[in-house]
Image (cartoon, grey):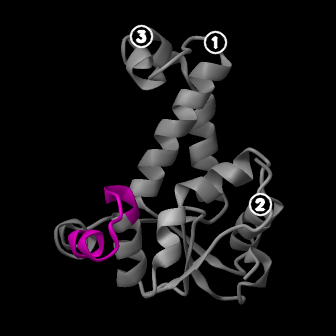
């Protein structure tokens, strides 16, 4: 299913990669999904792990774009430069803008992590963040999980939708 075909009023749990594709202009479908959320046509929910992962990735991207870190393991290189970290602001504005778009924050509960996510890992072989995002989506009884993560394609517990127009 094309992301544009998600029914109005649907509760959509959105994964980090889809937000990055929208921000980077790599998927018009992802961009339109966020616009629909901002208009209230869809209910967009980001689990806590998505907010954290996105914030981290956007911070690293800003540091790389400014030329203050490069090479392998930019996170370790940036961690050694607290003065640079203090000066990074663009990523913060981008993360805050998601709230302005109407995207919701959903906490990850202890049960999400220690019960549901571990069970989903055993069943599907998912990595931790993927299993927690899926656990939250299932707890919320979401209509769909929007992610381009290949590991989530095998999921049968919920509709997993991905942008079909990725330009990588």
Number of residues whose C-alpha sits closer than 10 Å to that of mark 1, classed few (under 14), some (14–19) or many (20 or more): few
Earlier sequence position, callout 3 versus callout 2: 2
Q: What residue is shown at x 31% (from left), y 58% (from top)?
A: 128
Quadrant of the drawing holding the N terminus: bottom right
Residue at position x 72%, y 81% from top?
41
Give SS at disc 2: helix
Task: Measure the C-alpha gap from mark 1 to mark 2.
Answer: 27 Å
Res 137 quadrant in image: bottom left
Q: Secondary structure at mark 3?
A: loop
Report how far apart the C-alphas of labels 1 and 3 lie in the structure: 13 Å
Highlighted magenta segment, given as a residue range: 118-130
Pick the residue in front: 43 or 49: 49
Q: Secondary structure at mark 1?
A: loop
Q: Residues within 10 Å of mark 3 (few under 14, many from 20)?
A: few
Question: Residue 77: x and y, percent?
Answer: 43, 15
Residue picked out by circle 3: 81
Decide whether residue 61 is among the magenta residues: no
Decide whether the magenta segment is chiefly helix, strand or loop. helix
Closer to the chain start, of discs 1 and 2, is: 2
Q: Is residue 121 magenta?
A: yes
Q: Earlier in the sequence, mark 1 or mark 3?
A: 1
Residue 47: give x, y in percent of width and height. Answer: 43, 64
Tell me, for residue 31, which label it has, or none: 2
Task: Report the side of 128 relative to 18 (left or right).
Answer: left
């Amino acid at each position: 299913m094309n992301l544009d075909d998600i029914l109005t009023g649907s509760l959509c749990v959105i994964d980090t990669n889809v937000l990055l594709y929208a921000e980077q202009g790599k998927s018009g479908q992802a961009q339109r999904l966020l616009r629909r959320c901002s208009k209230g046509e869809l209910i967009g929910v980001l689990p806590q792990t998505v907010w954290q992962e996105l914030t981290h990735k956007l911070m690293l991207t800003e540091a790389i774009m400014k030329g203050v870190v490069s090479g392998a393991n930019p996170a370790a290189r940036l961690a050694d430069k607290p003065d640079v970290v203090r000066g990074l602001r663009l990523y913060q504005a981008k993360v805050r803008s998601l709230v302005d778009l109407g995207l919701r924050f959903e906490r990850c509960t202890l049960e999400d992590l220690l019960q549901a996510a571990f069970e989903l890992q055993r069943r599907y072989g998912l990595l931790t963040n993927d299993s927690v995002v899926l656990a939250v989506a299932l707890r919320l009884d979401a209509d769909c999980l929007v992610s381009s993560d290949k590991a989530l394609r095998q999921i049968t517990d919920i509709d997993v939708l991905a942008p079909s127009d990725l330009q990588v």
